[in-house]
């Protein structure tokens, strides 16, 4: 299973080539991840406060195929591609909503970070269970 | 009449004080303006391409009352406060959706810019008529 | 006296009109403010940690005169225009470095915020003294 | 040989975890690339205008090791790792300037894009020659 969110391209996301700046696709993916967690009853902030755990990114990759432009709505598709106790890898695709054209694809690897000792730790089991339930 | 849009605060919008960076409220206002034009069948891009006109901001003002935080959804409220042939002034309020608390308020003054001669010009009559119809 | 900093316009700062997005001038002003404090031996972070005080913006205003473009270097000029125990108002001008053309001008009003009680407080006397010394 | 640039971490670059948002390291790399081209007498804009060529990114990768924080100055180190007529791959490392700690490392693959036909093309020979001369 996958999780999908639609995101309108904002004017400020574009650059002087009149296309979305490549760094902003990572922000679209994070918006989708935020919406996934919201739908599961979590947020980055609640993870910080409830579990004293953050979930930083340790790897980010993207291959760009075609540009998004102002006026486009993009669909971010998230898949859970890999997971261990301490790591989840989300694979993503971003498509133009109007015609389904693939704009870019890549992945994010996230890990658990113990905010008290600022060192690696297991991801919260409750988060993992809900993500697995939603995406596998 | 007013135009309202809800916008989720993104993690990337926050800063190390754990609140939304003050410059991002202007981006929320622009997102609301984009949604207003979308609802009216316009976009910045279509204005550029159809009328060879851009609508840059010539003044921006904001007074900050309370911070938004990650997890909040904010409601942007737009009013058309002033207008001439060449200028529109949108007044805005941004409130926290959950409890209606006022976070900030201000205005944006926009003008018509002829993209061929890169000089001031009247705002497109069709845009003005639709905005007036929606907001007055 | 004034404080001046040069800032190169980054590609990511531009938008599809091929000019700097209006919200980014506020970021240039903040970069100049950061450089001012760095030159005085302060930082936002040190204020937070040493004095448990933050200095949020309570008002921001800008009037735009001409666009900056990619490749430009802009000069931010800061003046201390007003001050009380609890408030400082910085007036700014941003000019294109190559020809001195005024791009925009405005002000920021900042106040002291007690991070323990999250309420208004006097600005740190040490900060105020150094800013006054540098800018008056 | 490598190209190095120092970049101060801006307050707006941080997020509510009090560290630099992961997407901003890609912006630091681009700032370094811009400084490299400036030192060689090129800019993205001049490439667009002189050669009708853009140099979009087709792949971006980063592995994160440690966080940068507000107050840090980071050093971006660029290497030319691979090149063909149509593609250059820059490998980068970002280190904290004060102690040299590695914060993240990755690469960007850029290609030539003919802005007239909006299709792949050779990178400008003059750009390639200068980059090779500076980095090999």
Image (cartoon, coloured by chain):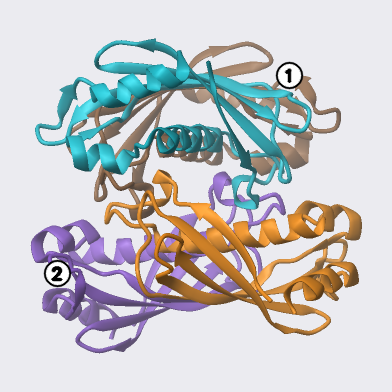
Chain colours: A purple, B brown, C cyan, D orange
Name above or below for residue C98 compared with residue D14.
above
| Horizontal relation, residue B79 to residue A96: left or right | left
User: Is disc 1 placed on a helix, strand or loop?
Assistant: loop
Q: Nearer the viewer, residue A98 or D50?
A: D50
Q: Nearer the viewer, residue C118 or A119?
A: A119
| Horizontal relation, residue A83 to residue B38: left or right | left
Name above or below for residue D36 compared with residue C45.
below
* Callouts 2 and 1 close, C-beta under 8 Å: no
Position in image of residue A28 (x %, y %): 45, 61
Q: Nearer the viewer, residue B90 or C50?
A: C50
For the residues marked 2 and 1, what is the alpha-carbon distance in whole angstroms? 60 Å
Position in image of residue C121 (x %, y %): 18, 22
Position in image of residue C133 (x %, y %): 40, 18
Position in image of residue B115 (x %, y %): 79, 33
Q: Give the quadrant of residue D27.
A: bottom right
State how many labels appear: 2
Q: Nearer the viewer, residue C11 or D133?
A: D133
Do the residues at discs 2 and 1 belong to one chain?
no
User: Mark 2, chain letter?
Assistant: A
Q: Give the quadrant of residue D104.
A: bottom left
Q: Give the quadrant of residue B53.
A: top right
What residue does disc 1 label? B122
Tag shown at residue D8: none
Identity of the residue drawn at 38% across and 57% down: D20
Identity of the residue drawn at 32% across and 19% down: C129
User: Mark 1, chain letter?
Assistant: B
What residue does disc 2 label? A117
User: Is disc 2 placed on a helix, strand or loop?
Assistant: loop
Identity of the residue drawn at 77% across and 33% down: C98
**Any part of residue B110 in sight:** no
């Amino acid at each position: 299973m996958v999780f999908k969110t639609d995101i309108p391209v904002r004017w400020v996301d574009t650059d002087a080539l009149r296309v979305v700046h490549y760094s902003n696709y990572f922000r679209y993916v994070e918006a989708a991840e935020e919406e996934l967690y919201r739908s599961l009853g979590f947020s980055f902030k609640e993870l910080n406060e409830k579990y004293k755990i953050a979930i930083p990114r340790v790897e980010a990759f993207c291959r760009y195929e075609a540009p998004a432009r102002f006026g486009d709505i993009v669909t971010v598709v998230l898949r859970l591609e890999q997971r261990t106790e301490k790591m989840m890898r989300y694979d993503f695709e971003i498509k133009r909503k109007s015609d389904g054209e693939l704009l870019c694809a890549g992945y994010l690897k996230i890990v658990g970070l113990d905010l008290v000792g600022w060192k690696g730790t297991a991801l919260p089991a409750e988060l993992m269970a809900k993500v697995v339930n939603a995406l596998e």
